């Protein structure tokens, strides 16, 4: 919690010190916004692959992102159907694993966010850059392994 408060204090102080007109636009969630055109080329490629449903370069792409940092907007998790939202332990375990409920059993799982790797040139591993997407379709970019996020604004 102290880390989160420190982050917001530093962000607020930074925005106050910027000359007017230099601050990034902020959405209602309080997160800065980045246009697709401003993303690194690798992030734009990852976003395109997400929209077309793959194929993904890394086995962990599409894994459930649990938002432990609580930086992204909080949303309910659990099993869902058109009219039902339950939070049973069994459903929660299936959702955490990213697996849908078996056909004909409980309603399908709904996990709020999924993460995707943004290639980092020169990195031998997945690197620190990610795109995290949720539903309704909203995606966020982090260049520092979930310490900060920017909401990706699609061009209108």
Image (cartoon, rainbow, N blue to C red):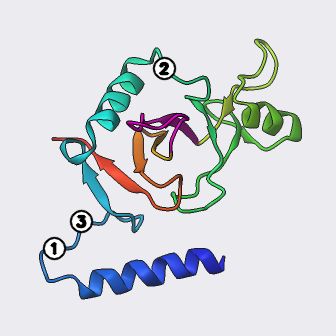
Cβ–Cβ below 8 Å for labels 1 and 3?
no
Place residue 100 in its image quadrant: top right
Nearer to me, 10 or 89? 10
Q: Is residue 109 above or below residue 155?
A: above
Dominant secondary structure, magenta: loop
Separation of marks 2 and 3 at Cα, in angstroms: 31 Å
Nearer to me, 33 or 116? 116
Secondary structure, mark 1, is loop
Q: Which residue is label 1 attached to?
A: 22
CA neighbours of label 3 inside 10 A, class few (<14), some (14 to 19), many (20+): few
- Spot occupied by residue 121 in the image (x, y as percentages of width and height): 38, 36
Disc number placed over residue 61 in the picture, else none: none
- Nearer the observer: mark 2 or 3; the answer is 2
- Spot occupied by residue 32 in the image (x, y as percentages of width and height): 33, 63
Q: Which residue is label 2 attached to?
A: 56
- On screen, residue 24 versus residue 91, left or right, reads left
In the picture, the quarter occupied by the N terminus is bottom right
Q: Which residue is label 3 attached to?
A: 25
Q: Residue at x 69, y 37 (%)?
A: 84
Q: The magenta stretch spans which residues?
A: 113-127
First along the sequence among labels 2 and 3: 3
First along the sequence among labels 1 and 2: 1
Q: Residue at x 55, y 28 (%)?
A: 61
- Spot occupied by residue 127 in the image (x, y as percentages of width and height): 50, 42
């Amino acid at each position: 919690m102290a880390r989160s408060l420190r982050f917001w204090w530093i962000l607020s102080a930074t925005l106050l010190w910027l000359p007017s007109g230099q601050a990034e636009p902020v959405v209602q969630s309080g997160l800065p916004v980045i246009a697709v055109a401003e993303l690194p080329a690798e992030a734009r490629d990852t976003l395109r692959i997400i929209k077309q449903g793959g194929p993904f370069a890394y086995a962990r792409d599409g894994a459930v992102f649990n938002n432990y940092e609580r930086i992204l907007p909080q949303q309910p998790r659990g099993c869902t159907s058109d009219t039902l939202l339950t939070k049973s332990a069994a459903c929660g375990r299936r959702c955490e694993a990213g697996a849908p409920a078996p056909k004909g059993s409980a309603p399908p799982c709904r996990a709020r966010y999924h993460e995707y790797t943004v290639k980092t040139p020169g990195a031998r591993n997945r690197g620190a850059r990610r795109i995290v997407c949720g539903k309704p379709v909203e995606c966020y970019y982090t260049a520092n392994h979930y310490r900060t996020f920017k909401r990706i604004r699609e061009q209108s």
